[in-house]
Image: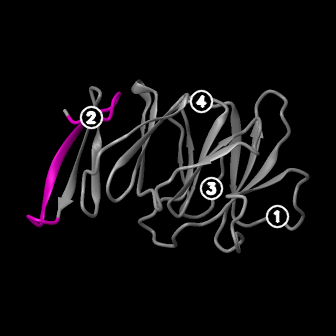
Amino acid sequence: MIESAPNATMVFGFPHAWQAEVLRSRPMILPPRHFVYPCAAEEVERGALEISIRPVGGAEAFLATCALGFRDPAAPTGVWSTPRTEEICAVAGGYAYLIDTTAPERFTMIPYRPVMKIVPAVDEGLLLFASHHSILAWGREGQAWESEKLSDEGLTVLGVEAGVLRGTGWELRSDTEKPFALDVRSGTRC
């Protein structure tokens, strides 16, 4: 069961072994298992994404508090399934956290600050994260690849079709949008 707080996106293209509820606010009484991402965030409460997560198969439920990156509505917020069934991707204002729901102390924060778009490439087994300049692919074993610089400031991802990711990136010298095509499996230009 998924309920969403205002403006939270929910995308479940990959099979997943957890249930999640995005909360409108932090519970008055914290549950016994509460994890903050990233661990050393200051003032994490302000605008944080609060998610109640229940792993399927007997692991104990927990509250995930994910620090907000940016308040800009262009920076995504929500929950995505990932290529690993036990992993959840939580994004708060463009800060993306990949959390192992069976061992919530294990997580990875995507290095882009901010992630501007998340694209599931289910057929290829990858979750794609677009920044202003490049794209990072996440698979079952972790980071699969990172593209070269595709834009001087701002990518538009048009979509994935037949194993090819297409989009445009702004080029400073010509002040124009330049198209790009990437092989989704390798991240190299087509």
Horizontal side of residue 174 vs 49, given as left or right:
left
Secondary structure, mark 2, is loop
Q: Vertical placement of 64 versus 72: above or below? A: above
| Amino acid residing under circle 4 | Arg
Mark 3 vs mark 2: in front: 2
Mark toward the start of the polypeptide (3 vs 2): 3
Secondary structure, mark 3, is loop
Magenta stretch?
172-189
Mark 3 vs mark 4: in front: 4
The residue wearing badge 2 is 188
The residue wearing badge 4 is 84
Residue 6: quadrant of the picture: bottom right
| Amino acid residing under circle 1 | Pro
Mark 1 → mark 4, Cα distance in angstroms: 28 Å
| Amino acid residing under circle 2 | Thr
Within-10-Å neighbours for mark 2: few <14, some 14–19, many 20+: some
Residue at point 27% right, 64% down?
Answer: 153
The residue wearing badge 3 is 4
Mark 2 → mark 4, Cα distance in angstroms: 23 Å
**Viewer-nearest residue: 39 or 30:** 39
Mark 1 vs mark 2: in front: 2
Mark 3 → mark 1, Cα distance in angstroms: 15 Å
